Image (cartoon, helix red, strand yellow):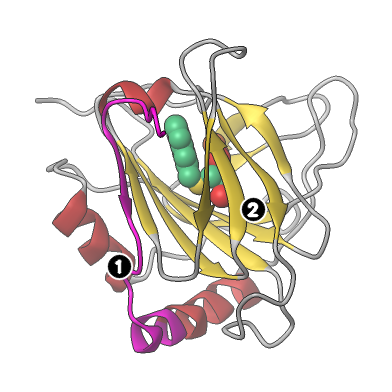
Amino acid sequence: MSNLPSGFVHLAGYLDSAEQAALVIELRAVMSEAPLYRPTMPRTGKPFSVEMTNCGMLGWVSDRHGGYRYQATHPLSGQPWPPMPRSLLALWNGLSGCAAEPEACLINYYARGTRMGSHVDADEEDFSAPVLSVSLGDHAVFHVGGLGRRDPKTRLTLKSGDVVVLGGASRRAYHGVDRVLHGSSSLLPQGGRINLTLRRVTRVVH
Ligand code: MD3
Ligand code: FE
């Protein structure tokens, strides 16, 4: 019995193992230029469970005093984010139905035992464009609910190579990662899970 929000499309196994391996090589280059770091929560300064970095013109960041926001530079190095790999731009062009390019690709790294609490992605100006998610490495138990925090949730497993398109109403739905199934994939030698989210941030002029 699944009751997914409208516009939620789960493409299980969309990337084959060669495409996944090629993407990991490109992401290693991105992460050597823009290292993973652990953001902190607005106001409390509590560290996130997940480590993050970005590629593209803009990156999503969070810290105690500045809050959630997009900015053009890595918060530790002060350097511009590395460009988005062309393979990701091609994925967006094939699946998003959005003529404008994605501006941000948030890279989340889930080490053993990490999770992401239920939230809505609301720091973008443009909600007409979908969010496109790519999962790599260990499987994750993911939940998606509705527009209200207490709405019923559907749980599904996101596996390596899965792509999810969050368009329409699903773009504003609550969602999160309950747990990562350690050792469920051999894609990443050190284990864990990488999730990419490609986003449009500024308004698309139609
Ligand atoms: C449903 N990431 O980075 S990706 C995030 O697996 C985030 O790392 C999760 O939530 C992860 O903000 C989930 C799938 C996803 C992304 C955006 C959504 C699902 C979504 C936006 C609205 C509804
Ligand atoms: Fe999210």
Q: Please state the horizontal and vertical placement of residue 73, each as a whole percent of the image.
A: 58, 49
Question: Which residue type carries mark 2?
Answer: His
Which residue is painted at 35% across and 26% down in the image?
Answer: 5
The circle on residue 74 is 2
Q: Secondary structure at mark 1?
A: loop
Residue of label 1 = 14
Q: Residues within 10 Å of mark 2 (few under 14, many from 20)?
A: many
Quarter-of-image position of residue 126: top left
Left or right, 134 with reference to 51? left
Q: Please state the horizontal and vertical placement of residue 15, each as a whole percent of the image.
A: 33, 73
Please tell me whether residue 4 belongs to the stretch shown in magenta: yes
What segment carries the magenta color? 1-22
Q: Please state the horizontal and vertical placement of residue 65, each as a whole percent of the image.
A: 81, 24
Q: Is residue 192 above or below residue 41?
A: below
Left or right, 184 with reference to 70? right
For the view shown, which residue lies furthest in the front direction? 1
Left or right, 127 with reference to 50? left
